[in-house]
Image (tube, rainbow, N blue to C red):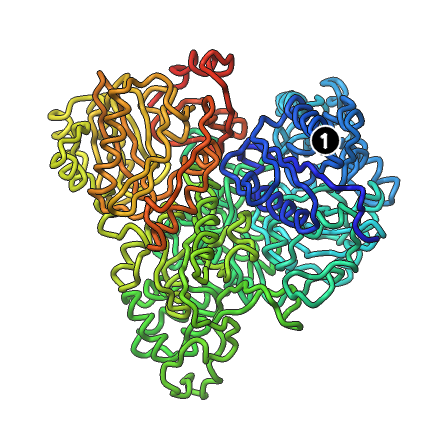
Amino acid sequence: MPKDSSIRSILIIGSGPIVIGQACEFDYAGSQAARSLREEGIVVSLINSNPATIMTDPINADYVYLKPLEKKSIVEILKAHQEAGHPIDAVLPTMGGQTALNLAIECDAAGIWKKYGVRIIGVDIKAIETTEDREKFRLKMLELGVGVCKGRTARSFLEGKEIAQEIGFPLVIRPSFTLGGTGGGFVDRPEDFDKALNNGLHASPVHEVLVEQSVMGWKEYELELLRDGAGNFIIICSIENFDPMGIHTGDSITVAPAMTLPDTLYQQMRDLAIKMMDGIGKFAGGCNVQFSVNPADDSIIAIEINPRVSRSSALASKATGYPIAKIAAKMAIGYNLDELTNPITGSTSAFFEPAIDYVIVKVPRWNFDKFPGSDRSLGLQMKSVGEAMGIGRNFQEALQKACQSLEIRRNGLGADGKELTDQEAIKYSLAHPSWNRMFHIYDAFKAGISFKTIQNLTKIDKWFLYQIEELVELEREIMQFDLEDISPALILKAKQKGYADRQLAHLLGVKESKIYDFRQEHNIRRVFKCVDTCAAEFEARTPYYYSTFNSPQLPSAGGEFPDTGALPVGELAGNESITSERKKVVILGSGPNRIGQGIEFDYSCVHGVLAAKEAGYETIMINCNPETVSTDPDIADKLYFEPVFWEHVHAIIMHEKPVGVIVQLGGQTALKMAEKLTRYGIKIIGTDYESLDLAEDRGRFSALLRDYNIPYPKFGTVRGSDEAVELSRELGFPLLVRPSYVLGGQSMKIVLNEQELEQHVVKILHDIPDNNILLDHFLENAIEAEADAICDGEDVYIIGVMEHIEPAGIHSGDSYALLPTFDLSDNVIQQIEAHTRTIAKALKTVGLINIQFAVKDEVVYIIEANPRASRTVPFICKAYQEPYVNYATKVMLGAKKVKDFDFNPVKKGYAIKIPVFSFSKFPNVNKELGPEMKSTGEGIYFIDDLEDDFFRKVYSERNLYLSR
């Protein structure tokens, strides 16, 4: 069926601020859906309260509503459109996660859609209710003949107790209508049941839970499906959880395609998934189905079905190259799969199942260190804040690349001297999974723990364990040689299994550069392969690449390769990335989301790419986060889905030969590359390394402030606890203690006495050895403010000054803040503006700069300056409706000067930045705020004046959560 011509205007509901369980994968989905609908001439309206998203940009939608995701906002939008004579015809609620689905159900129950003549497309309400209500889901599956766990729904405490008696222990509790497994958990013993049941009933918005048999230790799989209005189905890909049942899929290491699934079982699963999607409703759209398989007898049961774009949909899209959200949006307006073209090839039909000739591994990224005292065990409630994905020709290569992408100071899976050797501690970790279990499986093999013991403790499939055991055996073989007598064939074998040069250097006891030189000499170099949805059967139009190692040519019996001399990558066998003669720029992405570095930096990267394209450059994006818009193959001219890890970045730069690299948009991940890029003679576009380093080096930066007579808190730099105590007597308590070169206030703390100071300095040196530690005299009861500006080295334009509502001492990312300022005197604002201009020019800034201030007794002190895109830039862009990142990128590239822009911000009332936390995932952690950032996301809220009730409430509670 062609497009439904009665749908002319569509409302897309976003997912709101980022919380654990719902991150930027929905920005990716929403942005893709909006672009897909606009291609069809449809007027797109979009509601989302998250200012850091690309989807809420005017480049994506005709009407953007940065409003709270609640019924009242929906009514305002529908009414305004109706009164203006262009009513909204349909709502698409499947692109905004659980938040959007719940809001759509609420509006439906209140009769809002009916009142305004709005159709729900992409899903139907009945399907949502069937899948979200655990009892309806269970009964529907039984009706369809699909196996499910034994169990029933409890709507009261008494009913829950009765069901538990029937099923027996161990069992599992799953609350209805919750996100990321909130309130769910396993109960092994009767004495723990009452508390768990109570938690579950309270966590569910409808106060009901499913109490069912535990299938802990069974294997877990997911299938990602699409169905059109004619009933055509395709499976996009199968995903296998490395971790067995018992760990939330968002906290599991996942692999695509499924590695241990025999074809017979896959076909059964495929048939069941189609039957399930058909059984819950006849809508056109995407679906994610989760299954569990009993390893003893291969029986399959259905765990759940999500009739919307999910976290796994983003992963499946990036894993296969198939743009699920884009196609699902077109199907929602009536198209059938056979009427659409596959956007990757541009020549084949969208009605096909992707074939992939590589493996992807997703590894979650956790931030437990931000929540001292938190329960670090993994279970049914999701706790990870982000994820990284590795692509390789085999599981081992993809796994190592994913580990290299995490930025947790590991160079891959082991081979870096950071192994755990205590056998009892290893065994405990294997039986009680936490964020580092994967590393401890490797450590277990290395420590000589038996295969059988490892398998019994983890219940992980033997195939995966063999893969890790093989790596340990390969390392033992490598360690028998010196670099002088090792065969190139053995080094090639290690590279094909994902080993970084740093890991090989560790094993052979040499410098990383020696391994690099050895590889160049023997032509063991990265080649770049294309992700094309069809295993290279058709030509791909979308340049989306990953790196791997092909055999240069077959080695001789002695393991020597024929001497062809060092060939350019373009001439190596198997390379598919053809370089052009255009002038190019590389934009480094921000890696996996974590607290302190989230979607805001991806927003800046995407706008940097688009601006560089407008300035006539070929744009090359390097990033490893599958949730983001920056890794959508549609955004940059070329996407390299690779770790933002020196070895990979360097290989791409050597192949592409760009005019330079932009590091100031990708947060600390990209900035950390600046020093090495400079050392290797690679041009940094915009502010140079010398200036970036000057801003980070507190001693040199303070000397600069002193030269310009700009006030700053008394401070000193130390490298040990004795030195710190000595300095504290000179500076006076309270002191702010922090390491240098960190983001999100990592390891920052306010200390009140010498004992606290010593303890914290020892902790920092343990976590980050050889780091300079900064001690600042802490200005108590000061007001905090910050300014963002664009500078071209000569002129400075201040894009916005924000004032924090909470007192100084709470990290800027955790503070409520107002744009513009609300109670600073003219004198203070003049000082802020003058200091911003002076510092931006003194640091020779070319691009963006963010400066943080503390204001006390009408004097403005400088806390820090960061010559890069900050967390607040997207917020100011949205509040003032101007594309500042676009302007700043053109300044960095030298294409424009500050005075070339006609700045025209829309200033009306105030915009409040609302920090959003995920403390509910850590019930035993107090909500205490200090200089270390803990929020996972932010919202935006507009007010006309300071009499607003919401502002008054926030202002009255400004001192409530300040701790240290």
- Give the vertical position of 501 relative to 755 (above or below): below
Residue 46, horizontal then vertical, whole percent: 62, 36
> Residue 87 vs residue 398: left or right?
right
- Give the vertical position of 317 relative to 850 (above or below): below
Residue 109, horizontal then vertical, whole percent: 77, 24
How many marks overall? 1
| Rendered residue at 33%/62% (across/down) | 506
Residue carrying label 1: 85
Front residue (pair 612, 240): 612
Q: In this orientation, does residue 367 appear?
A: no
> Residue 273 vs residue 873: left or right?
right
> Residue 464 is drawn in which quadrant?
bottom right
Q: Residues within 10 Å of mark 1 (few under 14, many from 20)?
A: few
| Rendered residue at 61%/59% (across/down) | 321
Disc 1, SS: loop
Residue 317, horizontal then vertical, whole percent: 62, 54
> Residue 125 is drawn in which quadrant?
top right
Question: In which quadrant is the C terminus drawn?
Answer: top left
Q: In this orientation, does residue 925 appear?
A: yes
| Rendered residue at 18%/34% (across/down) | 721
Front residue (pair 185, 713): 713
Front residue (pair 846, 255): 846
- Give the vertical position of 142 relative to 69 (above or below): below
Amino acid tagged 1: Gly
> Residue 309 is drawn in which quadrant?
top right
